[in-house]
Image (cartoon, rainbow, N blue to C red):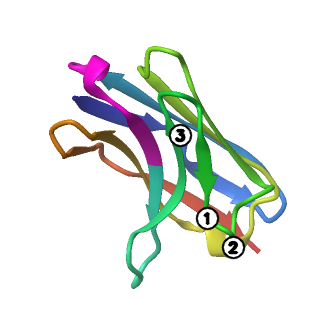
Amino acid sequence: VQLQASGGGLVRTGGSLSLSCAASGSIASINAMNWYRQASGKQRELVASITRGGITHYHDSVRGRFAISRDQTMSTLSLQMNNLKPEDTAVYYCNADDWGSAKHYWGPGTQVTVSS
């Protein structure tokens, strides 16, 4: 599975950005897709996830502000980010999980910077 994220950029506090991730390859094997982020000097953390069945999970810090979605084929993953805060500044990574083989696929990150 190959992943390519896009949509990062610079936005002011309170603004919005939308991230997208295009998946290709053996996407039929994907059971869940996730967005992670890693701020400078911090560990990578799970921001939001969605299963093939549509079950979502959010980090407490983004619940109510971010919305994750995917198409039915799991070929496109999106993250709508509203009311952005400076603490949302990080490199955001798209991730896909194949539970059957316990494989985790990562795409290159996209930078999101929120200015105060």
First in sequence, mark 3 or 2: give its number: 3
Between 78 and 5, the one nearer to me in the picture: 78
- Residue 15 image point, x, y percent: 80, 54
Label 3 packing within 10 angstroms: few (<14), some (14-19), many (20+): many
Is 114 drawn above or below residue 86 in the view shown? above
Instruction: Report, in whole angstroms, how far the alpha carbon at label 3 lies from the one at label 2.
Output: 25 Å
Q: Amino acid at mark 3?
A: Ile
Label 2 packing within 10 angstroms: few (<14), some (14-19), many (20+): some
Residues drawn in magenta: 25-34
Residue 86's mark? Answer: 2
Q: Amino acid at mark 1?
A: His
Residue drawn at 84 percent across, 60 percent down: 14
Under circle 1, the secondary element is loop
- Residue 69 image point, x, y percent: 61, 32
Between 53 and 4, the one nearer to me in the picture: 53
Between 28 and 108, the one nearer to me in the picture: 28
Instruction: Report, in whole angstroms, how far the alpha carbon at label 2 lies from the one at label 1.
Output: 16 Å
**Nearer the camera: disc 2 or disc 1:** 1
Residue tagged 3: 50
Question: Is 32 part of what is drawn in magenta?
Answer: yes
Residue tagged 1: 59
Residue drawn at 67 percent across, 65 percent down: 114
Residue drawn at 53 percent across, 40 percent down: 50
Residue drawn at 56 percent across, 57 percent down: 112
